[in-house]
Amino acid sequence: MPIQRSTALQPLSRQHHGGLLFCLLLKKGVRKNAPVGVMRDFVLDFWQKELQQHFHLEEAILEPFVTDMELKAPMQRMLRDHAQIREAIHLVDLQPSLLRIQQVQELVEEHIRFEERHLFQIMETSLNADAMQAIGVQLAEAGEYNCNLYPVRFWE
């Protein structure tokens, strides 16, 4: 059953949906033993067009609202996850391999699940209505990238 997310965090949740699609396409590509170079290009395209901006939004908009001790540890985990995913993508860029691509997929998927199931739920219960509204206003213009439209369909 899908989680009913607050209006304020829905733009990030929609981007997470796109991130899970990215992960699914990578899983299919790995299973099909798709060309590593093509999958590397897909990972870098998603990073440049979606994930990099998504991380920036979360770090710039959400982190300033973390004043409650209950939110400090989940927010620190979010930042550690972001750093780990950045490094994994950098390694895919430098020395692509199916194993490294699979690691990116696993890290991104686990990170999205953590944010949706833990971080966002804690934010929704810990932050007051004014804070949530302020977050929503800042996220209102967040766009979405559809990685399913990537021109090289290595997952098919």
Image (cartoon, rainbow, N blue to C red):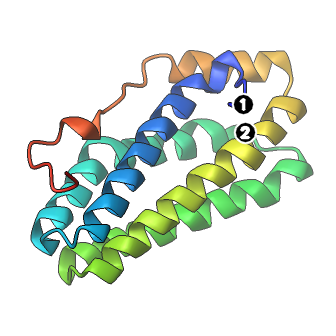
Q: Position of residue 97 (x, y in %)?
A: 24, 82
Q: Position of residue 128 (x, y in %)?
A: 86, 23
The residue drawn where x is 21% and y is 79% is 96
Asked if one can make out residue 68 in the rendered structure from this viewpoint, the answer is yes
Up/down of 65 relative to 94, above or below: above
Amino acid carrying mark 1 in the image: Ile
Task: Check the picture and name the quadrant holding the N terminus.
Answer: top right
Q: Position of residue 84 (x, y in %)?
A: 49, 72
Q: Which mark is on residue 83?
A: none
The residue drawn where x is 65% and y is 20% is 8
Q: Are marks 1 and 2 in contact (CB under 8 Å)?
A: yes
Q: Which mark is on residue 3?
A: 1
Up/down of 38 relative to 65, above or below: below
Taking depth in this image into account, of 64 and 147 the one nearest to the observer is: 147
Taking depth in this image into account, of 93 and 62 the one nearest to the observer is: 93
Would residue 109 appear left or right of 86 to someone viewing this image?
right
Q: Select label 1 or label 2 by which is in front.
A: 1
Displayed quadrant of residue 32: bottom left
Secondary structure at numbered mark 1: loop
Which of the marked residues, 1 or 2, is nearer the chain's N terminus? 1
Instruction: Identify the residue position indicated by label 2 in the image.
Output: 120
